[in-house]
Image (spheres, rainbow, N blue to C red):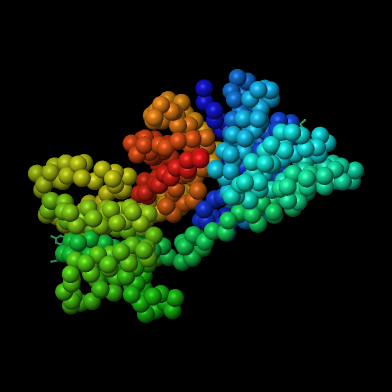
Amino acid sequence: ESEWMAFDDAEYSDEPDGAGAPQPVLAVVGRPNVGKSTLVNRLLGRREAVVQDTPGVTRDRVAYDALWSGRRFTVVDTGGWEPDAKGMQASITAQAERAMSAADVVLLVVDVQVGATEAEEAVAKVLRRSKRPVLLAANKVDDQRTLAEAAALWSLGLGEPQPVSATHGRGSGDLLDKVLEAFPTTPREEFAATGGPRRVALLGKPNVGKSSLLNRLVGEQRAVVDEAAGTTVDPVDSLVELDGEVWRFVDTAGLRKRVKTAQGTEYYASLRTKAAIEAAEVAIVLVDASEPLSEQDLRVISMVIEAGRALVIAYNKWDLVDDERRQKLNKEIDRQLVRARWAERVNISAETGRAVAKLAPSLRAALDSWDQRVSTGKINSWISDVVAAHPPPVRGGKQPKIMFATQAHPRPPTLVLFTTGFLEAGYRRFLERKFRETFGFVGSPVRISVRVRE
Ligand code: GDP
Ligand code: GDP
């Protein structure tokens, strides 16, 4: 049976500031009936998103997307402790430890009307060892009288109890503020809020046709947007209008010089390539379609993928390609470009202008994928299906379980899986394939990172 529950994603009307920042995780733990689900729904601000308990399915762990003060995060409801007497202690400890390993912040919910029971004492003991911040919610503080009882929870040694009433909503905003404060401060995603034209790197080995292509792209415009025109434009870049949109081709100074200086050593060329990739959001890698794919072509493509940039592969000099060559090329691509199967391919000729107009739509598609964010609800319902049909291979006699998953951030899209064991590379690749089958992500690398509990 699947241990996943899927939820509808929240519809966000506005894009919050931290859109590109990694999405931290809050885990909510506590005994059954203390009000975890009610509180989670309150925190999510969606009263309708009531936990869809399916009879017979263990409600083990569920994850939701949340948004507060412009920051996105994931809330994981770790499920109730099974109240069977013999396993209680172990179950409590296990839940707390899972939460500590998987989350950035742990929230222990206690029912003030019951007070701290042995169970809470036990879990507090575990949580006090936590390297992650722990917050204590004193729930069911519906009135002044119970407020005093919240203070009694200081005894758990987890700091100040935060009084909340999940059913009335009281205190939940303050609690969320505390949660955000406790999250690790992460650097802003470098491309999140820059705005302006999207940045493109034009890459490829010497003589593949980079200058010819740039000249054609620039030459086709009625009014060339000159690099000197814009004050905000770094002079080493070129602004190029394609398909009604201005793009910033980065680091093109070397390409635009009429008389090109010698390309220099390969080492130097590779440094240039690296710098251009770093500065770009998407790369067009030019490959000479009239020649066999070379080591150098593959290296540039790998550099783009490893840097996590979106990618379009342009097979240039298509005017020189005959039927025989085309068939050979298709075989080469099949065999050698396995890693970049998701990249869109455009067959162009910088010389004749063939299909050059197709570059812009491909760039756009690649960037759309690169920017794309799939909600935690959708990801968990997807992974629930995939894992049910193809569980991770057993290792060392143990079956690793995927507890939940979330897309930590876009640019590049990065999926984080929280597991109970190591997932083999082959299985990760399988998951990536399945992920793409469902969600697309044409033109963008997708990263899968695994956080193993323990
Ligand atoms: P969970 O098992 O920890 O997820 O707890 P639930 O969210 O299912 O809540 C258990 C019960 O406590 C439900 O009947 C809720 O209506 C009730 N409850 C939750 N929060 C509050 C609260 O703030 N005040 C009061 N009075 N009852 C609450
Ligand atoms: P770069 O070193 O990558 O900038 O390559 P260039 O733009 O200088 O091109 C190298 C050579 O390939 C030049 O002689 C170009 O005329 C030629 N070339 C570029 N694109 C094409 C093309 O699409 N078809 C053909 N037949 N030749 C091309």
Q: How far across and how far down the image is residue 143, in percent?
A: 88, 43
Image check: 291 left or right of 418? left
Q: Residue at x 76, y 51 (%)?
A: 160
Q: How far across and how far down the image is residue 64, in percent?
A: 59, 40
Is 272 situated above or below 63?
Answer: below
Residue farthest to the right, as pictured: 145
Ligand 2's image quarter is bottom left
Image check: 220 left or right of 69? left
Residue 216 shows in this picture: no
Quadrant position of residue 251: bottom left
Quadrant position of residue 46: top right
Q: Residue at x 55, y 43 (%)?
A: 101
Q: Residue at x 58, y 39 (%)?
A: 97
Residue 412 shows in this picture: yes
Instruction: Give whichever of 233, 67 is nearer the camera.
Output: 67
Is 281 situated above or below 56?
Answer: below
Is 215 situated above or below 2?
Answer: below
Residue farthest to the top, as pictured: 56
Q: Residue at x 87, y 46 (%)?
A: 148
